[in-house]
Each structure stands twice: as structure tokens, then as C-alpha cells.
Image (cartoon, rainbow, N blue to C red):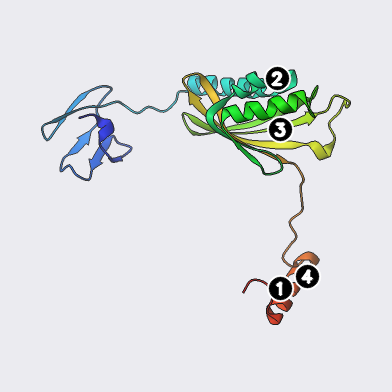
Amino acid sequence: MQLSELHGDLSNDGTFRHSKLSAIVYFVGRNDDIICGGITMRSTTLTAPTASTRTSDTAQIERLFADFLAAWTAGDAEAFGALFTDDSDYVSYDGTIARGRREHQHNHDKLFRGVLDGSALVGDLESVRYLTPDVAIVYGTASVLMPWRSTLPKRRLSRQTIVVVRTEAGWKISAIHNGRVRPVTVPEPDAFPSKMSQLMARIAHRLGFGRR
């Protein structure tokens, strides 16, 4: 019976408690044989990523983002699609969603040969935050610079939320959400827009309109 077949809780001190086993198993080292109730299990010590491993991963993710910009700028839909996992999701700035690497490649091939021919994708990676050793959230700016422009208009500034995952072929994009940067100020509760909204809600309720 392999350890992967068991389900239970592993505490920080290496104690594994299983709901269907009366014994408590202690993980004492890497790849030790553990005997529990006549069952031999193979243990593997769980270790946190080292600083050098994390640095290497971050460098690879930075390269992935740079390749994302470069493939677009080169108009290479095949190279662009290769940056994604087969089951990835791509949410565009208008809220539409495309599913799967092949669809991303197909859509961008049409864009690169059509309305975005000759465009460049410009921007910077802002941050990388690891959720697990194999999954990270990446924030970056990547905006389309049309060929007749030398600078990017503010209205075209975009920001991406990207989920990247470790695969056998390296880090890949599993999901991306692209949104325009259009900041709005949140009104204070006692500001005029808030007061007007509250007044309209009270009037609607008295007249029997709207959500009850």
C-alpha cells in the first residue's frame, strides 16, 4: 500500500493521523519504510523549496513573461500558444473567455494576421507570488502598442492576472485575465454619489421597484 493511497492529516512535527488507522505514524526521514498495523508504507520527507530553487523558478517565470511579450511582438501565434497549458483559460479585457491552448493559438493567429498585424506587446512583470511550489500568481502589465504609435496611450494600459504552473516542459500559463487599467475613486459613504444612491434606493423601495 502506497502512502498516496492514504488520506489523513500531516502535522508540522511529521505526525500522520489517519481516520481509519488506530496507529499514529511518524515520518522520520527520507524514503524510510514505515510499518503500521502490518502495512508497509514508503515515506517521503516533505521539504520546502530552497532559496536557490525559488530564485531559479522566479527567473524561469520572468522568462515566460518575456517570451509572452516577444511571441506577440513577433506575430508568432504558434510560439504564443506554446506558452499555455492545453487546458488553459484566457479572459480578454472585454470579458470574453477562450478555453484551451489551441483556441488561444487560433485566435491570436487571426489577430496577428489581421487587426493587430505589426503590433507589439509592451509591459513589465510586476510580481510573482507562490501559492504552492508548483503554482504561482503573476501580475504584469502587457499592453498592445499599434505600429503607427511610438508611445502607449493611457487608455490602452492593461494589467494581467496570470496563474502559472510547473509542468514537465517548464512553467506554463494555466489562466490569464486581462483587464484595462481604468481607476475609479471609491466614494466615501457620506459623499454625494453615495447619498444619491441611498436616496434612489429608498424611493424605489417605497414605490415597490427594484430588488426587495
Classify the position of the C terminus by image quarter.
Answer: bottom right
- The reply to whether dot 3 and dot 2 touch (C-beta < 8 Å) is no
Q: Distance between the residues labelled 1 and 4?
A: 9 Å
Circle 3: element type: strand
- The reply to whether dot 1 and dot 2 touch (C-beta < 8 Å) is no
The three-letter amino acid code for the residue at tag 1 is Ala
Q: Position of residue 132 (x, y in %)?
A: 46, 33
Circle 4: element type: helix
The three-letter amino acid code for the residue at tag 2 is Ala
Q: Which of marks 1 and 2 is nearer the N terminus?
A: 2
Left or right: residue 177 versus residue 196 is left
Q: Where is residue 106 in the image (x, y as percent from the top left)?
A: 65, 27
Q: Which of marks 1 and 3 is nearer the N terminus?
A: 3
Q: Report the residue that reaches farthest toward the left.
A: 38
Q: Earlier in the sequence, mark 1 or mark 4?
A: 4
**Badge 1: few (under 14), some or many (20 or more) residues near its Cα, within 10 Å?**
some
Q: Which of 154 and 56 is in front in this view?
A: 154
**Disc 4: which residue:** 196
Left or right: residue 158 versus residue 47 is right
Q: Residue 59 occupies which quadrant of the picture?
A: top right
- The reply to whether dot 2 and dot 4 touch (C-beta < 8 Å) is no
Q: Where is residue 101 in the image (x, y as percent from the top left)?
A: 58, 28
- The reply to whether dot 1 and dot 4 touch (C-beta < 8 Å) is no
Which residue sits at x=71%, y=76%? 204
**Disc 1: which residue:** 201
Q: Distance between the residues labelled 3 and 2?
A: 14 Å
Q: Measured along the vertical axis of the image, is residue 72 above or below residue 210?
A: above
Q: Residue 177 occupies which quadrant of the picture?
A: top right
Q: Distance between the residues labelled 2 and 4?
A: 48 Å
**Disc 3: which residue:** 141
**Disc 2: which residue:** 70
Q: Residue 25 occupies which quadrant of the picture?
A: top left
